[in-house]
Amino acid sequence: MSHFKKFVATILVGVAALISQFAFGQPKVAFLLVAILGGIVALSMVKEMIATLKSGRYGVDILAITAIVATLAVGQYWASLMILIMLTGGDSLEDYASQEASRELRHLLNQAPQQAHRIAGKELQDVTLDQVKIGDRLLVKPQEIVPVDGLVVAGASEVDESSLTGEAKPVAKEHGDEVMSGSVNGAVALQIKVSKLAQDSQYQTIVKLVKESQAKPAHFVRLADRYAVPFTILAYLIGGIAWFVTKDPVRFAQVLVVASPCPLILAAPIALIAGMSRSSRKGMIVKTGTTIEKMATLKTVAFDKTGTITAGTLAVEAVIPEGPFKEEELLALAAGAEESSTHILARSLVQYGKSKVTLHHFEEVKEVVGQGIETNYQGKALKIGSAAFAGVPKVGTGTAIYLSWGDQSVGRITFKDQIRPEAAATIAKLRSLGTDQVMMITGDQAAVAEQIAQNAGITTVHANCLPQDKLMILKNVPANERPLMMVGDGVNDAPALAIADVGVAMGARGSSAASESAAAVVLKDDLSCVADGVQVAQETMKIAKQSVLIGLFCCVVLMIIAAFGVIPTLLGAILQEVVDTLSILSALRAKNDH
């Protein structure tokens, strides 16, 4: 039974007990109803407590169980009912927080391919992925997701593999080239021959890693559990002494009623809900309260590069003329010729060119997919594209397009992945909030990664990493450098996000698989939301601790008073409600900006 159903059942039984005693004069029936409910809840809590103890953690359950049993044993069933309402209500609040936080994320895992177009003779059959066999010939239509790993047997197109590899530049695919499931086809249909079954293909392998990582969560002690053991011992000590001195078991029950751990059960979850709400207003959805607790004590943050530290789009870095053309003329020719192209580099070049010069207009332009553009300028062939297409030598290892006019090389235009303007400030703020270690883990080349990291203020870089490499790097972070946060946006980041203490997905343009596996999702295309989220978490936990301690201090005072027999059990339960109210009002401060 869910926590909410337990809470509703408790309320209904309470109403039935009230009607039985005060409307029909049947106190025995009222006692029986509350006793049965208390027994069921206590047994369920014992089961949960055993599971908690087996996992190596200690919780507040034992004190609550004792309070329920003690009040029932001495016939103070109304006090027992009040405790039951607070316990089931607190659990329901925690469930509500998790459900509300993930409401906007439930539709995100829609990237996984569901079907394929199988070529059977002259027919095209739509089949499910489990029907696809190795050796089958499939058609991948323009802009479709590649369903399984395979080899291109017909067609030539450009495929976006950025969510898998972290590389922002589309990759040209032609006959004989390998394509990976989860990548997105470009403007031309491809025919592929299946080389791996669906469950063995790249995308499904990554999803499998995510599930395995989620099945092995990191050990973590919640705020309420840390205070539970000393508070429980103190409550037993005060109650036991009062019972021993007075020889009256009711005195023990009176102490435990005011000692019921409702501030622990209510104050912390309410503060966390308030903090999660505040975090969402700042652009980051946090899925659970435990994530807030971990974020508040971060020691290490790891970032992916493409789409995370960088904007994920290639921009013009430099226009390098050779021969007869000056920089402005070369730019006008190249951007003008590329104006009709849908290539990602063409779009960046045209946008840049329009901001700098008046573009040259060409009447006829021929595009060779995955290679470049060919046109005519002053009676000579003008080629713009890869070095091989332009017929010129390649220079360096970076991303560039080359231009040739006739048989002469006339220059090149280089591109770079732009660092986010807010990246350096975000890294600096994380350090100021107490994060000791900041690293970058990327599938990109070392030279590119080092340059980006230097500009962002990151000193530790791991380059050329596959998804499994990222997992090993994160697993090897020592315990004294945890909790660990991983921030990424691609499918290739999903396993790392799942295994990190706190996985944060850049969900505005990132992969849905990454968002699903992450503990938090940034919904704005703004990296500074990560640092803001950490700050909110720290302020939330400060208020949560204050609220818990306020409640516990009041409980200790009431326990000492109750030990002298001044507070009857029902009055103790009512006073406990006052303490709960103070704790809740204090916890609600977490929803406000400070």
Image: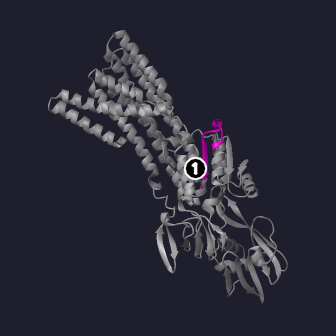
Q: Is residue 506 visible?
A: no
Spot occupied by residue 170 in the image (x, y as percentages of width and height): 65, 68
Residue at 63 percent across and 59 percent down: it is 307
Q: Secondary structure at mark 1?
A: helix
Res. 394 image quadrant: bottom right
- Does 274 sit above or below residue 14? below
Q: How many callouts does the rendering have?
A: 1
Residue located beneath label 1 in the image: 497
Residue 385 located within the stretch drawn in magenta = no
- Tell me where the magenta segment starts and ends, as one range: 475-489
Residue, x 38% and y 41% (percent of image)? 92
Residue at image position (54%, 48%) is 212
In the rendered image, which quarter is residue 172 located in? bottom right
For label 1, count other residues whose C-alpha is less than 10 Å away and answer few (under 14), some (14-19) or many (20+). Answer: many
Label 1 is placed on what type of residue? Leu
Tell me, yes or no, if residue 296 can be seen here: yes
Name the residue: 39% across, 15% down: 240
* Foreground residue among 286 and 166: 166
Residue placed farthest to the bottom in the image?
A: 379
Residue 470 placement (x, y as % from top left)? 65, 50
Vertical arrangement, residue 66 with respect to residue 461, above or below = above
394 lies left or right of 369: right
* Vertical side of 49 occupied by 288: above or below: below
Quick one: 550 or 234, which is closer to the camera?
Answer: 234
Quadrant in the picture for residue 250:
top left
237 vs 390, nearest the viewer: 390
Structure colour scheme: one colour
Residue 162: horizontal and vertical position, in percent? Answer: 63, 62
Residue found at the very far left of the displayed protein: 24
